Amino acid sequence: MTRRRNGNGSHQLLDITDKFRRGELKLVKVLEDAGYLSEKERVAYVDSIRRSVAQKRSSEVLATAHSLHNKLIRVLQTTKNDGSRRESQELEVLMEVSRLIQTTTRQEEGFERLLDLIKGVIPYENATMFTLNRASGQLVVGAVRGQVVDLIGGVQFEFGTGFSSWVAKQKKPILLNELHRNASPDAPQIGSFLSVPLVVQQELIGVLNLSHPTNQAFTEESLRLLTLIAGQAAAILQRIVMYEEMARLAITDELTGLYNRRHFMERMNHEVARAKRHQQPFSILFFDLDHFKRINDTCGHPLGDRILADLGKLMRRWARGTDLLARYGGEEFVAFLPMTDSTQALIAAERIRSAVEEHSFPRRKRLTVSVGIATYPEDGDQPADLLKKADLALYQAKKLGRNRTMALSLGAA
């Protein structure tokens, strides 16, 4: 069966890499303006960053970033040796933040460590790190020390409810030192409140809030230092987002949001071994959109892409939480249904076949799907054999007229 593929590649990864590149170029300029980089070093760093991005080598961009951040640590260490005790403490925090940028790949771990570092120079009772969810466009809690702290809860702004969303919109830090909140018993008492946005290249990343029960607990110097740390914190999150996106794209089909074929095969081998251990049945379903080539040929691949993405959403609604779904190639999809015998698989396949037939796709297109089913153990006990037999059942469903399901051990539905 011919495998074709709609989709335009990893635009999201390229976008994230480019934003990361711009952040690193900005750091080069800061170090150069401060006199910490020679002209030769500046040219070398800039050329390395641009070359690795042009060649789409994200790993080289990160390697260059590590080199830059090591340079920054050495600069801060030199400055620390010449500074006062208070400045030395602040620089120690900034050096630790810079190390976090290089070493942290997990958001929760990085931000909890960051909140602990901040407490060493800006004493607080409660701290909350909000991060911007890229999918929903809303702020969500990323890390907390003490209790979650915000003001004017319940008021809706662009990025969610609460004062943090207003700070996110304005992209400006706020210091409030004379608060007299009659808090409820389960809410923190807030006398002083400090909120700073996390921004990289004018792009909002999140918001950081601190609170203290007494008035005048924070100073303008606290605001200055937290704003400086927030800039570094935004760089940490940007790096984490890049790593997480690279990891997600490595296993996901960008167009449909389902797993890609390679990851499905890896997971399926694991699931088959587990089913054999526990002597449990499972079924493999192959789905193929009928006459999909006509859509691409007559309406163009952009509409074909939209239809495939819509089908991906339909399949996620159909599947159970334990099912494994993937785009196998082109208009063909595959599902692994654990603890499902052939009779149950046929019922499940009929549900998705009917759902597709009744669904109105983009541009009010009406489409159908054919489904082939193979079940362990009656149709085989090896992943490759079962996939081959599910594909054979799909071929027979097509041969019988399409828009039907076929289980090798049971026949057509």
Image (cartoon, grey):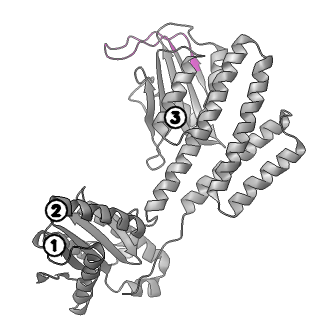
| Residue receiving disc 3 | 110
Neighbor class of circle 2 (other Cα within 10 Å; few <14, some 14-19, many 20+) is: some
Q: Where is residue 84, by image quadrant?
A: top right
- Can residue 367 be seen here? The reply is no
- Of label 2 and label 3, which has the lower sequence position? 3
Relative height, residue 376 to residue 49 (above, below)? below
Left/right of residue 109 with respect to residue 289 in the rendered view = right
Residue type pointed to by label 3: Gly
Left/right of residue 225 with respect to residue 11 in the rendered view = right
Q: Nearer the viewer, residue 95 or 318?
A: 95
For image coordinates 55% across by 39% down, the residue present is 104
Relative height, residue 296 to residue 105 (above, below)? below
SS for callout 3: helix
| Residue receiving disc 1 | 377
Give how far across and how far down residue 186 sits, in percent: 31, 16
Give how far across and how far down residue 402 sits, in percent: 24, 87
Residue type pointed to by label 2: Met
Give yes or no for residue 293 being in the magenta stretch: no
Could you tell me how far apart the alpha carbons at marks 1 and 3 are, in whole angstroms?
46 Å
For image coordinates 56% across by 9% down, the residue present is 217
Residue type pointed to by label 1: Pro
- Of label 1 and label 3, which has the lower sequence position? 3
| Residue receiving disc 2 | 339
Give how far across and how far down residue 350 sits, in percent: 17, 74
Q: Which residues are magenta?
A: 175-192
Quadrant showing the C terminus: bottom left
Question: Chief secondary structure of the magenta span?
Answer: loop
For image coordinates 38% across by 73% down, the residue present is 328
